Structures are given as C-alpha cells and as structure tokens.
Image: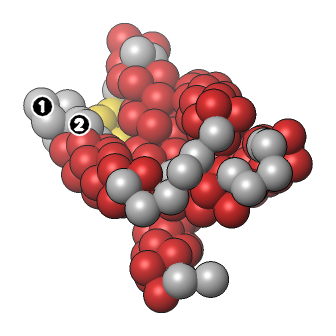
Amino acid sequence: MSAQLVVNILLAVLVLCWVLYRQLQAKPIKERSPYTLMLVLGVLGLLQIAQLTAKVEISAIGYAALVIGLLSGAAFGWLRGRLVHLWRADDGTLMRQGNWLTIVLWVLGIAVHLGIDWIGVALSPNGQTAGAEALGTTGIMLYLAVALAAQRFATLARIPAASPVR
C-alpha cells in the first residue's frame, strides 16, 4: 500500500468521523450556500482520482464500480435527508439534527459502497485489480461529497414541511 493511499484513507476516515459527529448535532442549515462543503470535498475527491489515474491502469469495471458506488451514496444520502429531524428555530433559522437512524444509514451506505468496490476488484481483469482497488479507496472522498450533497438536497426539499418550532 502506497503512502498516498494511506494518506487518502486516513483523510477520508477523519472526514467521516467529523461528518458523523456533526450529523448528531443540532445545526443551522445554510440556505443561501448549502453545498459549499460538498463542493470542496468533491473537488478534493476528483483531484485524488485524477492523480491516481495518471499512475495506475484501471479497468472499465473499476470505473463502473466507482459510479455505482457513487449512485449508492446518493441514494443513502437522499434517504438520510428525508429522515433527518428538521425545524425552524424561533428566530426563523432552519435547523437539522440526525439521530441513531442517521448513523445506521451512514454505516450501511459505507458498507454497500465498500461491497461494490470489492465486487469491482473481484471482477476486474488480472493485472488491473490493484488499480480498481486503489480507485475504490481513493474514491471515498468523492463518495462523501455525493452522499452529503444528496442528503442536503433531500433535506432542503422538505423546507416547506418544516414546522415553525421544535
């Protein structure tokens, strides 16, 4: 395992822990620029993938597994966004707070993503399994960006239904 791959994994784990912690906190939602964090994570994820693809040969199956994994992240994010507690504070600020179900859905989503990566590696032609494996690991940051963006989109779609008080 290369040093860059280890750094990517550690960075993704730190971001995931930070995301899970924040999911359980009652936090205001930025209604004017709600996707800034996701954009930053997405750009970082794409840069990591671009660096990897310049170094390693990756099979079409590896890329397909990445896309399917991202779609699963969007699906789990959308579901979390539909289930997160949403309300308006007395001052009109839109608030959100996750719960144990939010965490369960994160864990399931990551497990599905890793399973899809594993299938992509297993189905990749000989000689390209290392590239597919590295792509799956490197794609975690992009997965987080897509999953968070889908969650935010689903949450913001519920604004008219948000109750005026907690």
* Residue at which label 2 appears: 34
Q: Nearer the viewer, residue 95 or 36?
A: 36
- Asked whether the viewer can see residue 70, the reply is yes
Residue 13 on image: x %, y %: 55, 74
* Residue at which label 1 appears: 32
**Residue found 87% across the figure and 48% down from its top:** 122
Q: Is residue 9 left or right of residue 33?
A: right
The kind of residue tagged 2 is Pro
Helix, strand or loop status at disc 1 = loop
Residue 3 on image: x %, y %: 48, 87
Q: Nearer the viewer, residue 21 or 134?
A: 134
Distance of label 1 from label 2 (alpha carbons): 6 Å
Task: Looking at this view, name the residue that lies furthest to the top.
Answer: 160
Q: Is residue 63 left or right of residue 155?
A: right
Q: Quadrant of the N terminus?
A: bottom right
Helix, strand or loop status at disc 2 = loop
